[in-house]
Amino acid sequence: MTSNCPICDQPIPATVAHCSVCGFPTSLAIEALRALGPNGATASEMETAAQPAPAPVIAPPPTPPSPEAELCAAISRDLQEKLDYVRQLGRGSPDVTSEMCQAAMSEAEGRVSEALDVLRRAQRSLQRQTEEFLARRVKSLEARDEALRASGVTFELGADLARLRDALHNGGTTNTGQLLAETEARIAQFESDWRGLQGLLRQIDTLRNEASELGLPLGEIAGEISDIRSRLQEPNLTEDALDGIAQSAAQTLMLLHEAIPNSLEEELKRHESAIDRYPEDHPASATARRLHAEAARHLKRGRLTDATHSVRELRIEIEKLDQSREAQEIAVGEGGAAAPAPVPEESEAEALQRLLQKARMLAGRVRTLPPDSELARDAAVQIREVTDLLRRREVHQADDTLSRLMRMLAAAPEG
C-alpha cells in the first residue's frame, strides 16, 4: 500500500521505513496526517483561523492649527527670507537667529502666544537693524567717493549714490541692497584702476623730473603728459574714460623709456671723448671714469633713475676737469713754456701691440673679480669683444671698448 509523505508529499510504499526524498519515518505518517488536519493545516493554524479578526484602528483626524500658530509660521518664513537676503550683503549683516530659536522652543512647548510675541519683536528688530546696516554702508560709499575726489579725480558715482539714498529713504530694503551691491562693485573697480594709474603717473613724473633736471629734450612727450593731466580733471569720469587715460599713460611711459636712454647715451659718448683726453693713470679723472662706468652700467640694465643720478654727478666732475685744464693752459701761457711736441702717430702694428698688452692687463684685473658677479660677466663679454675686434684689426673700436672696460673696472672694488 502506498501513501504520501506528510512532509514532502512524495509517494512512499508501506514496506519502506523512511521517505526516499526527505527521510521522514513511514511509521509516523498516520500521526502526522492526523495532526495536520484537513487541507494540510496545523492545529495552531486552525485555532488562529477560528478566532475573529480584530477591528481596524482608525486614527482621529488631525487638529487644524490655530490662527496664532499659522501666524507664527508666516512670520518665521518672512524672517528666514529676509535673513537669507541680508546675509548676501557681507559681514556685519543683521541676525535674529537666536530669537527664532527661542520662538520655536516656546511653540513646541505649547506656548504659542509667547512664541508669537517673540517673532513679532524679532521682525521689528530685523527691520531696524537692516535699515541701520544699509545706512552705514551707504555712508561708507560716500566717504570713499570723497576720498577719490580728494585724490584729484571725480568719477561718475553721483547718480548711483543719489539712487541709494532715495531707496533707503523710501524703505525699500530689497532695492537698496541690490543697488548697494552694484555700487560697491563699481567703486571698488574705480579704486583699483585709479591706484594702477597713479603708479604709472608716479613713474612718469619721476622720469620727467630727472630729464628736466638734466635738460634732456622730451619733445612731444611733455605735451602728452599735460594732456593726461587735463583729462583727469574732467568731471564724472567713466570706466571707459579711465581706461583710455591709463592706456595713454602707459604709452607715454614707454616713450620716456625710449627717449631718456637715447639722450643719456649721446651725452655719455661726449663725456667719454672728454675723459679720453687724459691719461688712464690721471688721478683727477679717476672719479669721472668711475661715474661714467656706473652710468653706462645703470643704463644698460634699465635703471634710468640711477643712470640720471650718475650722469648728474659726472657732469660736475667733467666741469672740474675742464676748469683744471683751462687753469693749466693759462699757467703754461703766462710762464712762456714751449708747447709740447706733437706725439708721433703709431703704426697699426704698434697699436695692436699696445692694445694687446692693455687687454692682457685688464683680463688679469677681471680674474680678481668674484666669478658669479654681474661685473665679472660683463667684463668677460667685453674682453671677448675686444679679442674679436683685434683679430679683425679694427683698432679704433677695440681701443674704445678697452677704454670703457677700464672705466667700468675703476668703479669696482679691488680684490
Image (cartoon, helix red, strand yellow):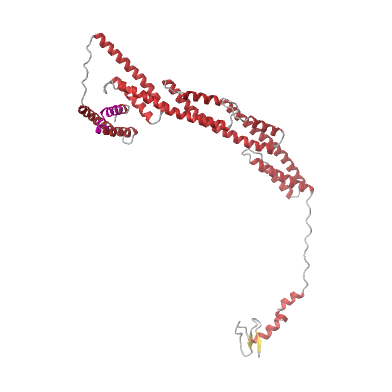
Instruction: Choose between 144 and 357: the one closer to the eye.
Output: 357
Q: Indicate the position of residue 85 as horizontal and vertical percent values.
A: 66, 42
Q: Which quarter shows the C terminus?
A: top left
Tell me if I can see residue 376 in this picture: yes
Q: Is residue 375 above or below residue 276?
A: below
How many marks the image carries: the answer is 0
In the rendered view, does 377 fall on the left or right side of 195? Answer: left
In the rendered view, does 202 fall on the left or right side of 235? Answer: left
Instruction: Choose between 289 and 35: the one closer to the eye.
Output: 289
Q: Indicate the position of residue 307 as horizontal and vertical percent values.
A: 39, 26
In the rendered view, does 177 fall on the left or right side of 212? Answer: right
The residues colored magenta run 389-404
Q: Mostly what secondary structure, the magenta segment?
A: helix
At horizontal 57% and vertical 34% (from top left) the residue drawn is 189
Magenta stretch contains residue 396: yes
At horizontal 33% and vertical 25% (from top left) the residue drawn is 290
Q: Quadrant of residue 297?
A: top left
Q: Is residue 117 above or below residue 208?
A: below
Tell me if I can see residue 305 in this picture: no
Magenta stretch contains residue 375: no
Q: Indicate the position of residue 164 as horizontal and vertical percent values.
A: 67, 33
Q: Indicate the position of residue 308 as horizontal and vertical percent values.
A: 40, 24
Q: Quadrant of residue 330?
A: top left
Instruction: Choose between 213 and 115: the one closer to the eye.
Output: 213
Q: Is residue 230 above or below residue 31?
A: above
Q: Is residue 412 above or below residue 330?
A: below
At horizontal 69% and vertical 32% (from top left) the residue drawn is 166
